[in-house]
Every structure is written in C-alpha cells, then in structure tokens.
Image (cartoon, rainbow, N blue to C red):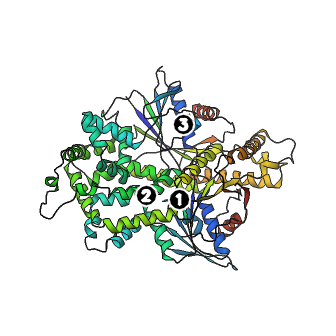
Amino acid sequence: MVKKAHLITGKGGVGKSLFAAALAQHLSTQSSSKKAAVLLTELSEHSFYRDFLKQPNISYIPKPWKQGVDLAQWSPDDCLKEYALHLLKIESLYRLFIENPVTKSLIQIAPGLQDLAVVGKLTSSPRRHGPVMNYDEIVVDSYATGHFLSMLRAPSSLQEAVPFGPMGEQTKSINECIRNPGFTQIHLVCLPEELPVTESIELYNQLKNEFGITANFYLNKMSLLNVSDLSGLSAEAIMSLQNLLESEAWSREKLKSAGINFIELPLVTLPHADEIISTIARHLDEPGKVL
Amino acid sequence: MMDLKPETKTVICIGSGGVGKTTLAASLAAGWARDGKKVLVLTIDPSLRLTQTLGVTPDGDIHEVHLPEGSKGKLFSCVINHQKTFDWFIRSAAQDANVQLLLENRLYQQLSGKLSGSQEFTSLISLYRYVNSGDYDLVVLDTPPSQHTWNFLKAPEKISMLFNEGVASWFRQSDEAPNFFKKIINLSTTQVLKALEMLTGSQFMKELSSFFRAVQRWEGPLEAYVSNCHRLLISPTTEFILVTALDSSRLNEAQKLSREISKQGYHLTCVVINRVPVWAQHETSAKDLSPRVQDLKNYYKSLADNLKSGLEQFKKGLRIYKCFEQQQKAEDMTGLLLNYDHIVTIMYTN
C-alpha cells in the first residue's frame, strides 16, 4: 500500500523534474525491499522524462526505470478512465460513458474534474479505492505553483458545489486524505532569485495555512561559489558572478527571516541526465540534510 | 532591439518557465513604446511578476506606465483578473436578463473562479477585447509556461465543444416538459446519463443540466466570439515569439513547441535565447581559476557551444535573437529598456 505521496512543485523552470527523479532515487535506496518500492510519475501533458531520461515507452502503466523505481506518466484522462471502469465494471457501459461527447466535453471544459481525477488516483491506495498499487511511496513531478494549488483545492471546491451523492462522498475522502500531513509531503523547489523566492514563500505560507502542510523547501542550482573565488577574473565575469552571489545571499536571508528551513542543492555542471540525478540524490542522502 | 512586421498588431510571448519570459515581454513592450508605438502589455500569469516589474496592481484595470523623457510612444499594462473578465464576457455576450441564472450556477462559479480552467480562455478574451478596441498600435501578451500554451491555444476549441452537435441538446429543457430526462428517447443516451448519475450523483446532474441550459441561450454570440478569437490567433498580424534559454532541456522543449505551433498555423516569427552568460565565452584573464569557477565557466561555455547545433533544429525562416544576461536588479524601467537594447540577432535562417 502507498504510505506516502511526495508532490514536487515550484515555479516553472526551477528543476522540478530532475529533483523529482533524484528524490525517487534517494527514497528507493532508503528502502530494504527488493521490488520496486517507489513510483515516479509525471503529470505534464508532454512528457519530460521521455526525452530527458530516454524512456520512449513511458505511459500510464508503470515501467521499471532503475533499481527500485518504476516510472509512469499520469494524464487526467487515464486517471478518469481507470476510475470510471473501476466503478462501472461493465466494459461496454464504460466505453459508452467515456467515448461520448457529453463526457468528453465535460472533462475538457471543467479542468477541476481533471485535477480531481489526478488527486483521486494519487490517494486511491490509502482510501482503498480502485486498483491496487504495490508501492511504498509515490513521487509526483507535479504542476507549477498556480496550477498546483488549484489541483489541491479541486476536491474541496467540488465538494462545495456538490456536497452529496457518490461524487460528494468521493471528494470528501480525497480531500481528507490529501490534507493528511502523514500522507502528503510537499517539496517546494526554488531558485535563488528574487521572484521565485518571493513567490515560493507565498506558496509555502498558503500550503501551511490552507492545508496544514509544512513543505520541504529547496534552494536549487546554487553556485557553491565564495567571494574569494572571484579574484583575478575579468570585470565582466566578476559582475556576473557577484550578482549571482548577492542573489543567493539575499535568498538565504529572505527565507531565514520568513522562518523557513531550507536545503541547498548545487547547480550540477555534468552533461548527462543520469549524472545530474545521481549527484542530487547523493545530496539528499547526506546526513544532516535528511528530508 | 527586435523588429516586427509593420502590419503586426499582436505579439504573443510563449516559452517554458524560468527563462525570463515576463521580463522579456515587458522589455519588448517598453522598447517598442519608447520607439513610438502605443503599446499595451497583458500578463495572464496569476503570480504577481509583472505587478512587481511594472508597479501595477492586479485589479484587472489598465494602468499607464511611466516612460523616460524623450520617449515617442506610450506604454500601458494590465494584469488580467480572470473572474472579472469571465463575468464581463458572459454579460456582454448575453445581453439578456437570464445572465443571473448562469452566474448563480455553482458549476459556473467553479469553472470561472476557483479552478484553473478558464484562465487561458479569459486571457484570450482580454487579448481579443483590447486588440479589437483599436486603442493600441500593439498588444503584447505574456503567457504562462509552455505546458499551458497548449491549453491557451486550445481554449477556443474547448469552449466550442460546449456547443458540440447534440451535447447541449441532451440537457435542453423544453417549456412543455420540465423533466428533460423524459425528452430523451435515445436508449444509449439514457444509459450514458445513468452512468454519469451513478458516478456523480443526482445533484451534480441537476447543476450540470442547468449549466448547459443557461449556457445554451447564448450559443450564437458565444460561438461567434470564440471563432473571432481563433481568427485573431492565426491572423498574419499576430506574431508569436518563443523565449527559451541556453540549457539543453529548455532548448529541446522550445524546438518541439516551435514545430508544433507552426504546424497548427500560428505565425511563429522569432526565437529569443534569453539570459546568455557572456563572460564564460572569453574568460581567459586568470590562469589559476578556482576549481568551481572553472567548472561553471566550462559549463556555460559548453552550453553556448552546443547552441549552434541546437538552433539548426528550429524550423527555417525564423529570426533568432540572443539576449545577454542582465544585472540582477534590471527590473525597473531603465533595466527593461537596457534589456531591449541588448537583444541581438544571431541567426536569420531562410
């Protein structure tokens, strides 16, 4: 049974997908079991892992990626299909249901339903609803800031609109599950730059106040430079790197004064995806920097 | 600086997140305004980025932005307020007292407000509204990261689906027979509705049918509006500008996006490689760099070296620009204009 769901979010372009892969790798090495204990799944419509990890067969059905980690891509449509089939049982009725214009346009125009389907799938194992999932933990390379919040809010929003009936029951149990800090872990990835930091602090506080969840905060792509490293460089280089250092110092200070604990991750300068992921995973393994 | 076709009225900036798209959109708008055009820049990102950059408030109103002395044009900015825009759209399309019915429908409220659904659509409505107003020489739109670009471009199609042959009619209520379920004679339709009810409950079905009934009243005006929006997107006076960065995953994503949007008939004309760190190219002054500086230098340099092969993957006929990395606090007006002036052509493929 799935005991924990790790949701990765942050502003666009901060390195969520690579971090998610590294976290999955890190978690799998913590597990003693031999079978795949971790499922890494991405929600983006156009797969990032297909190209970046060279996994041309990535799909809704999990496939082995590396020791202890399976890889999948969840589209809202797939999640909804699985759920509908599970409830309706009868194949022909299900096909009629899924492949008719009313359902199709309904799903298309109300993305709240799509978000609900994804969160429903995510929480299906502890709710004992739907097909069995044989993983201990799921790592979700999730949406960027704004969409992420709407996704988490989808169950409670729809519960407000439709409080009773089967859908009301479902949204209620999904909502309870997603707000359980023992189950849902949120990892907020951020760059040491002014706007991402400001926006991420805002999200951190929203998650805390609205969902009672304290996110793990990461400052990603840190330069690991010191002021002393800059001596002897050209004026141009000094200006560029000094800006970088100032921005990093500003970010640390800003987070400290907001009372947020954070973990620093380095900018990995290696060329291959596997090397980058392993390097970040090693940083997550290090004692004193445990999650 | 960047050249547009003289007839261009609309510029849409697209690209993956974290490449400085918003700042670039603001820089372009500021530059074109300084050089003589009357420009409006719209952002659809729910974050407060442009707000912080241009010092406006996210109230959905249009604000004039102060330009330096000697500027030849004018700059206006607006952070789109989705709820306000959607309501404005519904009211202006309806011209009918029954608008209240829809505004009170809880599914509508979910659709337009709390959920992420209609934001792409409302940006499109705003874009159409302001381009069509004729008040500006140029309207510049900053879009959310590329994942959402698809949602944005598909917005007209999605709304059209509401009026798909038959869909609305399934939920249509005739005045003589209040129970619309009774009107349905087709067996398979009944089965589908039963399945829907089994999955969602009868209350949801009630909301759904009243939503479709309310929406159906403006089938005509809505559909006309939607097709006008689509026409605006594919118009030759609309230019798409793709913003990307040096690293390979973003370049890759940009290439995919550029092929796809050109295939769909949109006019992608420019690609901007943003935030190019210029120092790494020719840093030779120090003999013994610290290992980490050496490391970073090699990293940035290899990215720049790989750029050429990366650029060849873009489709022919695009103007490709490079914009150098700016000082950190470059988000005031001086910084924006400096940014604009530092955009250089690196390739003009044919």
Count how many numbered circles sit on residues in the image.
3
Left or right of residue B262, residue B213 in this image: left
The amino acid type found where label 1 is placed reads Thr
Same-chain status of marks 1 and 3: no
Q: Residues within 10 Å of mark 2 (few under 14, many from 20)?
A: many
Q: Are marks 2 and 1 in contact (CB under 8 Å)?
A: no
> In this picture, is B9 found above or below A116?
below
The amino acid type, in three-letter code, at marker 3 is Arg
Q: Chain of mark 3?
A: A
Q: Is residue B209 left or right of residue B250?
A: left
Tell me the element at label 2. Answer: helix
Q: Which residue is mark 1?
A: B143
Q: Which residue is mark 3?
A: A50
Q: Chain for mark 2?
A: B
The residue indicated by pointer 2 is B155
**Disc 2 and disc 3: Cα gap in Å?**
26 Å
